[in-house]
Image (spheres, grey):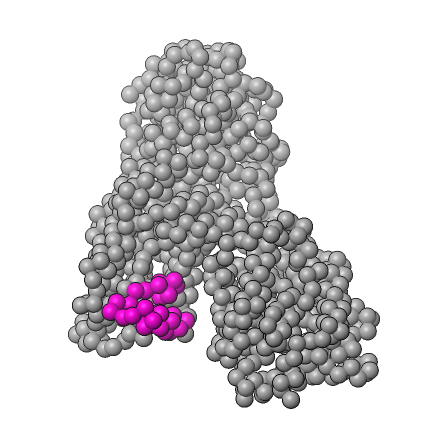
Amino acid sequence: MALEPVQVVKSGDVELAVYEWGTTGAKPTVVLVHGYPDAASVWATVAEGLAERYHVIAYDVRGAGLSSVPDHTQAYDLEHLVADLATVVDAMSPDQPVHLICHDWGSIQSWEAVTTERMAGRIASYTTISGPSLDHAAYWIIQRLKSGSPDQVAQVARQIAHSWYVGMFHLPAVAPTLWKAGLDKLWPGLLEKLDGVRVDASDSQRKDGANGVNLYRANFAKRLLKPGERRTEIPVQLIVPRQDKFMVAEIWDDLPQWVPNLWRREADAGHWIQASHPQLVIDWTSEFIDHIEGAEETPALVRARVHARESRSGRVSDRQRGRLVVVTGAGSGFGRETALLFAEHGADIVCVDINLEAAERTVELVRLLGAQAWARKVDVGNVEQMTALADWVEADFGAPDIVVNNAGIGVAGSFFDTSDADWDKVLRVNLWGVIHGAKLFGRQMIKAGRKGHIVNVSSMGGFTPSKFMSAYNTSKAAVLMLSDCLRAELADKGIHVATICPGLSITNITQSTRFVGLSPEQQAEKQARATKLYQRRNLTPDKIAKAILDAVEHRRDEVPVGAEAQGSRLISRLFPTLSRGLARLDLLP
Amino acid sequence: MNTTRHAAPSPQDLDGFRAIQQLAYRCAETVSAQLKPGMTERQAAALMKTWLLDQGVDDWFHQPFAWFGDRTAFRGAVGFKQLGGFNPAFYPGLRRLEEGMPYILDCAPSMNGYTADIGYCGVIGENRILDRLMDDLLEYRELIVSLVKQRKHLSEVSQAVDRLCQRHGYDPRHKAYPFEVLAHRVEKLDNDGEKSHLSLFNFGVRNIGELLKGVAAGRKEGHSPLWSSHAKSDHPPTPGLWAVEPHLGFRDVGAKWEELLVVTEDDAFWLDDDVPHVRRWRARGLLNPVKRAA
């Protein structure tokens, strides 16, 4: 689908093809700058979406699309690229500063525009996607190599491995020859393989690919070997596509040192996010531009705000950085430990508990670890309350990355002493709580294209029959099967479902388990004895939290925690008769 | 003889204990002001020891301890609880202090027959987790004395402390002390005029002897000089002086205070409210008359 230029702007000897969507007037102007090996057409869908609210401009960078091709490599120097952008902005928005949205090389060159004097006062905000400043990148490399820390040196090595093509582009003739030899025809297919993005073949693909190589040749070596300190006060929104094959996420870690007004958001997308997730790019950029134009900062932007002197005390790693985790039963036990562990690794946490005070305490602890957190009082078995929770999360932050359906209650005793009310309660919390959580948040994940994780906390009781645990174990077995079915259904969506089956672990649940058919005094005694037994076993909640983090990071399906859970799982699978025999033993404390 | 062991201290004795506790806290504050990045735990402990000896200290309950960094939370070898908690990793080591690293100074000097046992924590620079722990330690001080005033059995008091830790989300790290004690008794020694007394493995022989005598007597009479959550502490508070030391841990940060609680036949009170952690709470406006929800 070829775009028609609305105007051709002359920048020195070069003619730039400029495209326009929407009308001028009171609306803010947005300028889209494409990367390599693309042309302005890569923005088509995003531009149309943004045009409903803004005056939208895009142009073919020199050498690409319908713009003219300079005859020597040095004409691709960043200085000329900034002059091109300035010329387009002056022509299309002479009175108002513009909002830049830039991708890949478009972003690399625009870092030059926002950190130098040439366009001072002409840029209102800058959204950058997958294109760091070459100078920042050089400092990033130098600081890591100087640190001598093996981790940091490894980051540099990984980034260099992701940039293999840059070296190739510096070889004489190779890259242009490849493009001319037919790579342009293969490109849409390659892109689909690489990034899962389906794009129409572009008429100018051969030209975009062959000429754009000069962008690298004219600038890379020069900037990396002699970087300058480039800062900007302009508000910058950084969008990080997590599955970007050309960029490691750590490349952005030092950005707060150069950019005091920074927001950072992460998406489950590949490098060409504007083609694969146009609506997300439209939503996030609109939210940001509106805020810069005076609208109140949305909760999502507040969350995305990066504070330069972010408190690092308590932070163990950034592996879960940018993730939003919803944890039910977060006021104690596994839930609280899971919230704390994910926070230590950089995630933000929605702490849900029926006991608000306990959830709020977890929030305080999470904040001490330098992460953000919110507390909500919710009965997970109540569909209205769960729906309200899910609606609030989606409205304020979008679909969560991870949902841990952990809240649970205990019931023990004879089947015949277990009243209908006991059954109703244990199934409502232990099973319906998981059903509601998985359904409400799973639906959000599908809608948002989130490759998220649904973690359901079952129990070794889910595969260990026992004559005194009919209600509890039935609820946990149901969670196990529900998770298995859901895992199959969500596999194609990239959403991972994990089932955690803890053994005899110390939590509130033993202290509050209802022992049916007993007087309150006998019950208290049983609770105390169960707690003591579990204390001797000493399977602490932090071990379950570690299993949950591990299940998320390694996409594990079913995780028994503790030797007793592992053993019982094996027995139930390999020797079901033995398992049924053990169920008859009086193992109650 | 054991009935006299458990008499409430006389006003004169209380003055003596108060004076040595003040001296011990002054020592911690003085040494704390001298701590610099790069110093080791051993150097900090030696500074305390020298300072106290210069003031005329003639015996110890234990010689000064210092823990830096995650050792304040008894992470690693120092958290090893077997052997009843007698663990060589407790002794001051070669860990070096850094900016932002929490530390705990703990000293227990005796002079003229009176003994104190105090715990003091701090940081060079700032540590938000430590600040929070130190703020929350206030609730433990109020809880403990109020339950002892109600003559709750000591194991119940200790279990209430455990529950408060659970609610707060903290590890009760005093469980890593020998016999998992929240507190231990301190007895008045003879004022024999000697300039120094024997220590073994950094513990004062006379003070530990008193403790052992208490253990032996308690075995017959159903009480213990070691106050923990266990059945051995399932008895009403015994009159006398108790060095109480709730020690909280959150992730890699630990914090504690330790001071003497006075138990009489029908009452209990902290020996002295003019101690650094109380002054800190007052300065931060945490000591309001409205009781916080328990």
Image coordinates of residue B89 in percent, x first then y, are 60, 73
Q: Is residue A523 magenta?
A: yes
Q: Which residues are magenta?
A: A507-535
- Residue A188 in view of the camera: yes
Residue A462 in which image quadrant: bottom left
Question: Is residue A306 placed above or below B46 in the rendered structure?
Answer: above
Q: Is residue B44 magenta?
A: no
Could you tell whether A56 is left or right of A305 in the image?
Answer: left
Question: Is residue A314 placed above or below A137 in the rendered structure?
Answer: below
Image coordinates of residue A7 in percent, x first then y, are 41, 10
- Say which residue appears at 37% left-offset and 40% top-offset: A393
Image coordinates of residue B201 in percent, x first then y, are 67, 80
User: Of A188 and A6, which appears nearest the observer?
Assistant: A6
The secondary structure that dominates the magenta segment is helix
- Say which residue appears at 62% left-offset and 53% top-offset: B287
Image coordinates of residue A490 in percent, x first then y, are 25, 46
Considering the image in quadrants, where does the C terminus of chain A appear? bottom left
